[in-house]
Amino acid sequence: MPQSLATREAWLNYVTGRLASWFEDLDAPLPPRLRIAIGFTSGGRRGKSIGECWDNANSADGTFEVFIRPDLAHSADAMPAQIAAILIHELVHAAVGIPAGHKAPFRRVAQALGLVGPMRATTAGPELLERLAPILDDAGPLPHARLETGGATTSPKKQPTRMIKCECRECGYTIRTARKWLESAGAPICPHEGHGQMQHEPLGEEGEEIDEGEAESLWAA
């Protein structure tokens, strides 16, 4: 039994080490170089993949890379078994080779290990859960909690283009256009004959937001 599994990676590597003999018994040994982490897959937060295995051909040091997304399972009690089942699915990819996809070589090993359901979206069957129980007990609590993104993102907020109000002082005809057109081509011409070029609200400094009330007062000046 491990003395301490303080990180998610340590927990995942411990479980993988205990699973290695299962793969050897099926003549599908795990590759010697594996990195396993909990993190978003290449599709990001909006992606549908719950796990992903990258071929060692994509790695600068010839290592298979496995990722399991961090926003799974609301129940802390269910999470270790769910993570372990996803881990086993991705380890099968590493064992049989990524080019095999979910075809016969993958199916043979996955089903023998106790994964059930469609091969693209397997879950742990009752026999697998029973076999996993002592391993998960020995591994202890998974040092991870579900990441609640709630639609949030760490990406910088994209500032929307502020459309500039243009108005004809003769008839009040109003449109809005982007700053770049006002700077490159000037204010538009009112479509009513003889009314000429329209006026526009102050541009301010580029990127500067002008308060609506301030814009109206400057407009009227």
Image (cartoon, rainbow, N blue to C red):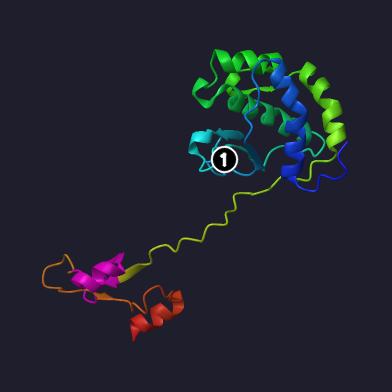
Q: Nearer the viewer, residue 45 or 22?
A: 22
Asked if one can make out residue 58 in the rendered structure from this viewpoint, the answer is yes
Q: Residue at x 46, y 76 (%)?
A: 211
Q: Residue 88 placed where, x, y %? A: 68, 27
Q: Is residue 171 magenta?
A: yes
Answer with left or right where residue 9 lies relative to residue 220: right
* Residue 141 percent across, percent down from the top left: 84, 41
Q: Say which amino acid is labelled 1.
A: Thr
Report the residue at 83% width, 29% height from top: 135
Residue highlighted by disc 1: 41
Q: Residue furthest left?
A: 194
Quarter of the image containing the N terminus?
Answer: top right
Q: Is residue 120 magenta?
A: no
Residue 86's place in the image compared with 212, above or below, is above
Q: Is residue 207 above or below residue 143?
A: below
Task: Give x and y (percent) for residue 81.
Answer: 77, 30
Q: Bounds of the magenta span? A: 166-188
Measured from the top left, where is residue 82 in percent x and y?
73, 31
Seen from the viewer's position, the closer of residues 186 and 42 is: 42
x 70%, y 19%: residue? 24
166 with respect to 87 (left or right): left
Residue 191 located left or right of residue 215:
left
- Number of marks in the rendered image: 1
SS state under label 1: loop
Q: Give me the residue at 77% from left, 40% from top.
A: 11
